[in-house]
Amino acid sequence: MCNISKILNLNYVDFAKRYLKITPYDFTLWDANLKDTGKKKMMRTLILNFDQKQDCIFLKKQEEKFLCQIYQARPQQCELYPFWSMIMTSEVTFQDHRLICPGFHVPKEEAEFFTPDHIQRLVNNERRIERDYFLAMKAVNFDIMAYYPFLKDVSALDINK
């Protein structure tokens, strides 16, 4: 958030009011080897406040292409898309995202090739992010206000618009 706030020339509080919302999320719990434990934990998390179609608010059309307005500071989740565990481990979810993700429609000669090992590393990075977030939230008793202290200066009405 720090880098995005800087690019947008906003402090954390104004950034949160304008672009974030708190939402419950059912996190998969990953073990030390980044394997699914079969357990989940529902906890509150911060997400970008997407529009009704679930399009990223920073993805803007420019000359027939959609470009990220915060690309150099995009969150790691965005950098890893579409190589998320939930997409790469489900044929149905993969096919759904294949239909909507512009990256799947790049001509072969322009596309970057990813080996299966590279894709697995990306999936593991995403799992590591989720595991580390879970552990950090657990350390503050799953209190999102303790994890993100700047949220204390943002009213619930402002951030959950």
Image (spheres, grey):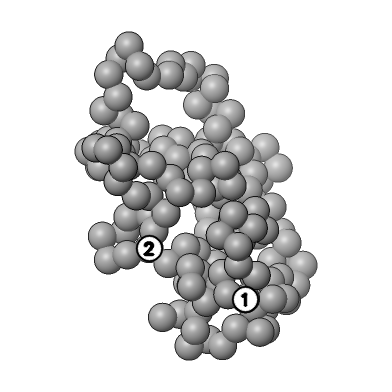
- For the C terminus, which image quadrant? bottom left
How many numbered marks does the figure carry?
2
Query: What residue is at 32 percent from the left and 11 percent from the top?
Result: 109
| Label 1 environment density (alpha carbons within 10 Å; few <14, some 14–19, many ≥20) | some
Kindly indicate whether the residue at mark 1 contacts the one at mark 2 (C-beta within 8 angstroms): no
Q: Nearer the viewer, residue 94 or 77?
A: 77
- Label 2 or label 1, whichever lies nearer to me, is 1
In the structure shown, which secondary structural element does the residue marked by tag 1 occupy?
A: helix
State the residue in front, 33 or 73. Answer: 73
Provide residue 86's location: percent of width, then percent of height: 42, 44
Residue 127 lies left or right of residue 99; in this view the side is: right
Of callouts 2 and 1, the N-terminal one: 1
Please tell me whether mark 2 sits on a helix, a strand or a loop.
loop
Residue 87 lies, in percent from the top left, at 39, 40
Three-letter residue code for mark 1: Val
Residue 2 makes an appearance in the image:
yes
Mark 1 — residue?
Answer: 13
Position of residue 54 measured from the top left corner of the image (x, y, whole percent)? 31, 58
Q: Is residue 88 above or below residue 139?
A: above
Residue 79, given in percent of the width and then of the height, sits at: 52, 40
Task: Determine which quarter of the picture holds residue 88.
Answer: top left
Tell me the residue that label 2 is attached to.
50
Apparent side of residue 64 relative to residue 72 in the rendered image (left or right): left
Identify the residue shown where x is 54% and y is 47%. 74
Disc 2/disc 1 C-alpha distance (Å): 18 Å
Name which residue type carries label 2: Phe
Q: Is residue 42 visible?
A: no
